[in-house]
Amino acid sequence: MSELKQTLNIAMIGHGFIGKVHSNAFHQVGHFFQTPFQPRLKVVCGRDREKLEAVASQWGWEEIATDWRTVVDRKDIQVVDIAVPNVLHAPIAIAAAAAGKIVLCEKPLAMSLDEAERMAAAVRQVPNLVWFNYRRVPAVAFAKMLLSEGRVGQIFHYRALYLNQSGSNPTKASGWRYQRAVAGSGTTGDLLSHSVDLALDLNGKITELMAMTKTFVPARDVDDAVVVMARFANGSIGSFEASRFAPGSRNRNSFEINGSQGMLRFNLENLNNLEIFDATEPANLQGIRNLLVTGPNHPYAENFWKPGHIIGYEHTFIATLGDFLGALARNETFHPNFEDALAVQRVLDAVQRSADSKSWLTLEG
Amino acid sequence: MSELKQTLNIAMIGHGFIGKVHSNAFHQVGHFFQTPFQPRLKVVCGRDREKLEAVASQWGWEEIATDWRTVVDRKDIQVVDIAVPNVLHAPIAIAAAAAGKIVLCEKPLAMSLDEAERMAAAVRQVPNLVWFNYRRVPAVAFAKMLLSEGRVGQIFHYRALYLNQSGSNPTKASGWRYQRAVAGSGTTGDLLSHSVDLALDLNGKITELMAMTKTFVPARDVDDAVVVMARFANGSIGSFEASRFAPGSRNRNSFEINGSQGMLRFNLENLNNLEIFDATEPANLQGIRNLLVTGPNHPYAENFWKPGHIIGYEHTFIATLGDFLGALARNETFHPNFEDALAVQRVLDAVQRSADSKSWLTLEG
Amino acid sequence: MSELKQTLNIAMIGHGFIGKVHSNAFHQVGHFFQTPFQPRLKVVCGRDREKLEAVASQWGWEEIATDWRTVVDRKDIQVVDIAVPNVLHAPIAIAAAAAGKIVLCEKPLAMSLDEAERMAAAVRQVPNLVWFNYRRVPAVAFAKMLLSEGRVGQIFHYRALYLNQSGSNPTKASGWRYQRAVAGSGTTGDLLSHSVDLALDLNGKITELMAMTKTFVPARDVDDAVVVMARFANGSIGSFEASRFAPGSRNRNSFEINGSQGMLRFNLENLNNLEIFDATEPANLQGIRNLLVTGPNHPYAENFWKPGHIIGYEHTFIATLGDFLGALARNETFHPNFEDALAVQRVLDAVQRSADSKSWLTLEG
Amino acid sequence: MSELKQTLNIAMIGHGFIGKVHSNAFHQVGHFFQTPFQPRLKVVCGRDREKLEAVASQWGWEEIATDWRTVVDRKDIQVVDIAVPNVLHAPIAIAAAAAGKIVLCEKPLAMSLDEAERMAAAVRQVPNLVWFNYRRVPAVAFAKMLLSEGRVGQIFHYRALYLNQSGSNPTKASGWRYQRAVAGSGTTGDLLSHSVDLALDLNGKITELMAMTKTFVPARDVDDAVVVMARFANGSIGSFEASRFAPGSRNRNSFEINGSQGMLRFNLENLNNLEIFDATEPANLQGIRNLLVTGPNHPYAENFWKPGHIIGYEHTFIATLGDFLGALARNETFHPNFEDALAVQRVLDAVQRSADSKSWLTLEG
């Protein structure tokens, strides 16, 4: 019964955990978003044929392939989705863009600022997206709406944490995310990048920063934790902390914003909730309010279920893709794209240089 | 790349909110569960052709139909899924069972105890399921596991609430759920049924009960709220309260179980969490513990995402269907089925009779 | 530097835990409340001379005594404070009132309704108070203020819990509170009495009720838990549950009130907080708000510390006494007094009779 | 009935909010702690005779005085308690010590590091205390106990916040705490000092730090907010943030400690609670546990009320004084004393110099 939609043939490079999350989004976007496009899971590409076959079978990819260079040049592919370790983001993205494909890429964008700049330049002519999915948490999108309406007043503080406990387990913390040659950095690229993307989106530019990194495991060549203090262009000050050494937190991507008229607070472990404080109410009625951001009149409430029926982690990818396809249909620029991710990379680069030099750094532009 | 699976052609009767939730489960079950069956969304059936076409288009149903009697007799259909107002559950289920179909039915099972008995008898020869989906919330399944291991000790109290605020808005509360002729009852069937199903599953049989109902809106012919006190076969006592007149709650399906060795507490508004209290620990370390039930070693953790990556409302339907297909493959009886739902109906019937007669009632069986 | 105040010589009968709490209130009331009276801790009376001396030494009682009959007749005593097991409330209160003393009495007032009626009659000519101290929790007093202003609208539900875990420890649960001959009842008088007092104060008269009690420990002759369903004169329905068999709760005296315009919720374990929900706000900003009721513009905020500086359990007694002395100075009737406690006793009596007869009971008056 | 105790005549210099809190502690310490000393509220000293008389009347000070120099030399005074703005701490403390008095002083100790060093030297021969009262929150003392037992393992992170909203209200934020000449600093001395004292006590020495301060109000000459990153001698890293510009927080003095075996978390707004996470438990039972630190077997549980009966802000001062008198009776050195406060001042001094110079500073000693 499906109306005529324009098929978008997808090639996904990568087949790990995040590849499953993307596969799900390609399947689900049409169920929750009105879009003239129909993603078709054409080919999944990776190195391990056995795993590829399992993923293809489970998630309905039509073909498997093991050479991404061939795949990105295929005429029948319209979209290249990059879901591989960071070291491969640049070559694939640049090749895919050169082949005229729509490019979707996992975060952090690049191994270095220089690489990120080249990538952003490369994709300038094609629609592109970076999977900073947390912008599309309904509660985060609602926070942005409230900020835009000026409901928090003059911003004083932006305070972000991204804590998990993945790194402190020596038997588990041995994957590519713990190797500089493959990941580029440790916690900085893995976790802090998300916090920085949200900060730039919600609170604007960072003008200067000072950072400290720490590696707790002797042999490890990436940062296990990072702390940043910053000044924003809007006059507020920021503090950031990210760590994979924080037992007690599984996925605590949180921020708190204090302003002259109130406060907003979010924690990914309760992703359907936003806490707000309205300092303009009568003093004896002021209190931190826990909003269940499942509608009515919340972002994405019309797309997913009914008020009181919560969504999960995966929906943030569906919403990202849904908005991307919407922008594509309207021929608009989507955010966050490679330019946005480049801005994040600029901050991450300054973080590493500041930590290395133990000095404040000014960010340009 | 899909291995050969046995196709199950689904006919879904109904196309409202819950029909979308079921549609989603049929699409998603194969992504999260290993199963030899491949549900195929063959036909969606209802009265309103325009809405049917929209649902079919959005959710990928191959055909639409408007006469359920014809549909349930179709030779190419293996599964009939009933997602219509309560008054139609019995005729459709009985006809579908007579036609030898696998029968899936929304809750509450029936308009009356008598009807439920006839339905349970009718489906005895076919695989069947009732969508008491909350048993498959991972946190609830984990609670059951802890109870089964005896970790709560002798149970003293079972305390359940199911509160929302849907009924107190006169402009919205006018659908079929507010009409006795279509729904059979009000809050009792709509909300209390879920609480009773969980109570029977987690805490065993109710031996006697006393109930009070209340209708706040003058012209309404169904109960807006219901309160129940009960005695369980295991010696514990129970209290239940359900209401659609509870501003402050969107979907607060909660229970708390106190036993000689601890406490378990759940609230659907935080469906990824289970609160536990272990009374066997040293006294100064005893405290209510908030578990994020997303793994490791939690029910369904292998099916969905990684620890710390939460799931939403819809996953409880996917897990229900996944387990059903698993039981089907192994030729086992699935729970909750029509028999389980009949047991719930027996309690709901006693609730109504007790409220009407203002007297304690003993439950048999 | 103390201005001239009128001394009130206090005789306290009883020297257990609650006697210390009262002693503290007599010392502290003048520090936090402006009052023309100066309580003087004249004599503490009990059976155990050694314990009496310890209490007197620790809390500054000038004298000890072991015969309450002599004490309540002493000319130099103006106030008799009753802090002994329930069985002694009536004889002491009646004797003290006959001697013209101001009478302060612990809760529950009496062993029976009949006794409560005789006590209330006896004290009619003297200023009197019953220590239902939780009315003076600032958060509770603020809840009452909000209710009085109509901010919750038409009340639908009054839901109260009072749970602790004291009774489930066989080695500890052997004091007078577990003996019918001394306590009159178990959980009903100990815990439910507080819930009933708050309910009557906050939500008005109960017109009919149905109750169930449970004794978990075989040899025990008092109720370990009690559940009540009720109808209030204002059209709302109530549910109450009290238990000393609820591991996970230390002192969970909580209530929740749902009305057409919002919700109020309180839990004694967080006694400085009141949760409110305002259903008149824009739908997307509605959420449960956690108020820290420490000022500004909250009840007793001027008496105790600054906003953000919390108070503890004992302050509810200080505030009760402070208000009592205020009423005394203005020659006004204080609440809760013996009449209020008689109203509570009338409900408790109905609870026991209903539980015994397994039938609904109508309350008069 | 009081046994013979040794009277300690107190002279309190200052009569503001904190003077009342101290007055309360002098009155209450004997009720909750066994001590051979009996504090006697002999004289309260300040500039404003009218306010002095009010405080003396309300809190039972025997005399008032307006010249602190005369007071600290009085032969009948054994204890000088300093509860005045920071600028006066040094002259009074030094004079009192010179007169051989026991010296109790409010925090932060001094206007500068140099001053703090002179003060610490001056009091070396007399018993002394600095009112860093939060060490004696039972939950904080329990955290220290758990840390000492090694239950958190190797410490990775120490994270502290002290946030309130006092400074963002221009009409209120005009007292001495907002003037450098009287307070020495702004948020740093007012709030961060508490966080630093707890950090040093719980996590040991800070070896180097980097700080940023911010003044949001143009004309103001003190810091409104301060952020610090630090390295501790034990290999952990620290982050601190303090602000009087954080609407949403009334008195949020919080810390979180992540270690290889678990997590501890505290927030003064819930001062009776400690949150703990035990990473040594089975993975599926790990969760953040909320302890109600009111006994049994918690610090100060024997001093105050029963389990489940919470204490308030003031009790931290009572416990501080109780422990001080205990140390005095045993002729032991009490902590936190002037030496401890000097260590805090050394950190605060480095914070200011680091913020001014925008550079990392190494702390000696």
Image: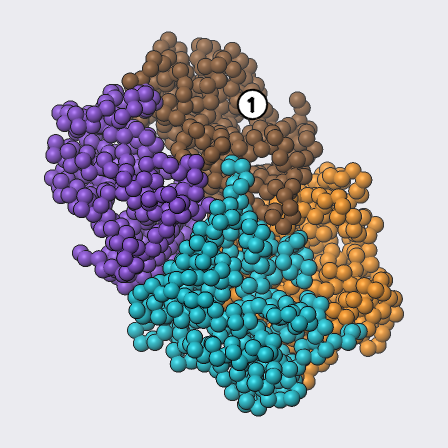
Chain colours: A cyan, B orange, C brown, D purple
Residue at image point 32% right, 34% down: D18
Residue at image point 19% right, 34% down: D92
Residue at image point 28% right, 36% down: D85
Q: Quadrant of the C terminus of chain B?
A: bottom right
Q: What percent of the width, then of the height, locates residue B81?
A: 76, 67
Identify the residue under disc 1.
C340
Amino acid type of the residue tagged 1 in the rendering: Asp
Does B347 appear above or below A163? above
* Residue D301 falls in image quadrant: top left
Does D219 appear above or below A357? above
Residue at the top extreme, as displayed: C75
Residue at image point 17% right, 56% down: D365
Q: Is residue D138 visible?
A: no
Q: Is residue C140 visible?
A: yes
Number of labels in the image equals 1
- D336 lies left or right of C130: left
User: Which of D167 and D156 lies nearest the eye of the viewer?
Assistant: D167
User: Which of D126 and C157 lies nearest the eye of the viewer?
Assistant: D126
Q: Secondary structure at mark 1?
A: helix
Label 1 is found on which chain of the structure? Answer: C
* Residue A100 falls in image quadrant: bottom right
User: Which of C143 and D291 lies nearest the eye of the viewer?
Assistant: C143
